[in-house]
Image: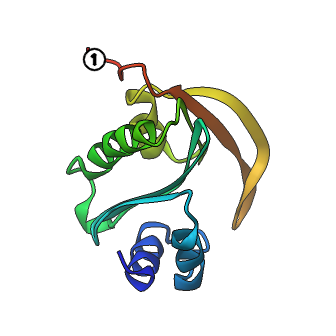
Amino acid sequence: MEPEEMARLHARAFETERPWSADEFCRLQSSPSSLVLGDSRAMIVARVIVDEAEILTLATDPDHRRQGLARALLEDFHRAAQERGAETAFLEVAADNAPARALYLAAGYTESGRRRGYYPREGGPAVDALLLSRALDAPAPGQS
């Protein structure tokens, strides 16, 4: 994906937060540790360093939600991260992002930490960031 396309998708997916710019995506893609999967409908951006993989963002265009795209990308990410030597995957998600939390919990992630008041919310109190992790060699719940 081109950085401009990534920035447009990120802006559509994260309307209440500051979207990442094309320049930020360009810098991310230039790193050898970066892993980018997806297309104009949904993407996952991560990095793999030694035996750890971190999801930086997973974005789905609002017009393409509830079609299994994020779930499929997450599975592709798990495989690609393992191929690069990662044993554990990490991410952070806003405590008030119920759809994302449900996706990650269904994929076998568990809460490993919390950053209190991490995400500012206009007109309300800041929301905690939940730190989630998962061993990549473990199957997701419901899989064998």
Image coordinates of residue 15 in percent, x first then y, are 50, 72
Can residue 42 be seen in this snapshot? Answer: yes
Whether residue 126 is situated above or below residue 26 in the rendered picture: above
**Apparent side of residue 115 relative to residue 10 in the rendered image (left or right):** right
Give the labeled residue for mark 1.
142
Instruction: Residue type at mark 1: give it.
Output: Gly
Image coordinates of residue 76 in percent, x first then y, are 31, 44
Q: Quadrant of residue 137?
A: top left
Crowd tier of the residue under label 1, counting other residues whose Cα lies within 10 Å: few below 14, some 14–19, many 20 or above:
few
At x 59%, y 34%, the residue is 132
Q: Quadrant of the C terminus?
A: top left
74 or 30, which lies in front?
Answer: 30
134 or 65, which lies in front?
Answer: 134
Q: Quadrant of the N terminus?
A: bottom left
Numbered marks: total: 1
4 or 113, which lies in front?
Answer: 4
At x 33%, y 67%, the residue is 61
Can residue 94 be seen in this snapshot? Answer: no
Image coordinates of residue 28 in percent, x first then y, are 57, 69
**Apparent side of residue 6 relative to residue 109 in the rendered image (left or right):** left
51 or 23, which lies in front?
Answer: 51
Q: Quadrant of residue 114?
A: top right
Q: Quadrant of residue 74?
A: top left
Whether residue 113 is situated above or below residue 118 in the rendered picture: above
At x 62%, y 27%, the residue is 111
Whether residue 41 is situated above or below residue 23 in the rendered picture: above
**Apparent side of residue 8 relative to residue 93 in the rendered image (left or right):** left
Q: Residue furthest right?
A: 116
At x 77%, y 42%, the residue is 115
Q: Secondary structure at mark 1?
A: loop
